[in-house]
Image (spheres, grey):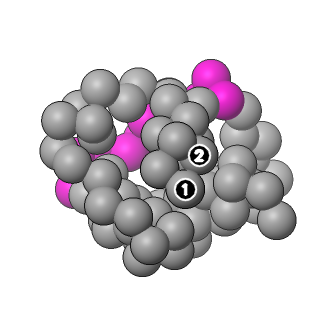
């Protein structure tokens, strides 16, 4: 499974998003109604899944799923 698909699954599971929702690299946190607490939970799950650490500064700069996926791929 590719990074994007794994991230989509994690976000869907963490936020209870319907499986019919189609994520894209341009999907923003606002589009999926993710508040700051949701984002913390998503990042914690991402860190566990990919065995990486995502600093707060990096999270603050991420506006889309594409930003998150690019960060993960760079850290692998």
The kind of secondary structure the magenta stretch mainly shows is loop
Classify mark 1: helix, strand or loop: loop
* Highlighted magenta segment, given as a residue range: 25-38
| Residue at the spot of label 1 | 76
Q: Residue 13, how many percent across, how many down?
A: 57, 71
Classify mark 2: helix, strand or loop: helix
35, above or below 7, in the image: above
Q: Residues within 10 Å of mark 2 (few under 14, many from 20)?
A: few
Q: Residue 38, how many percent across, how many down?
A: 32, 56
Q: Residue 74, how many percent across, how many down?
A: 52, 42
Residues under numbered marks 1 and 2 in contact, where contact means CB atoms less than 8 Å apart: yes
The residue at 30%/61% (across/down) is 53
Magenta-drawn stretch contains 4: no
| Residue at the spot of label 2 | 73
Compare residues 7 and 19 and report the one nearer the observer.
7
Query: Along the horizontal axis of the image, is 19 left or right of 35?
Result: right
Q: Quadrant of the C terminus?
A: bottom right
């Amino acid at each position: 499974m590719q990074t994007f698909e794994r991230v989509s699954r994690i976000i869907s599971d963490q936020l209870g998003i319907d499986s019919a929702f189609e994520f894209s690299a341009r999907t923003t946190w606002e589009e999926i109604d993710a508040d700051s607490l949701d984002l913390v939970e998503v990042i914690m799950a991402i860190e566990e899944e990919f065995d990486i650490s995502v600093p707060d500064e990096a999270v603050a700069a991420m506006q889309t799923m594409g930003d998150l996926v690019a960060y993960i791929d760079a850290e692998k």
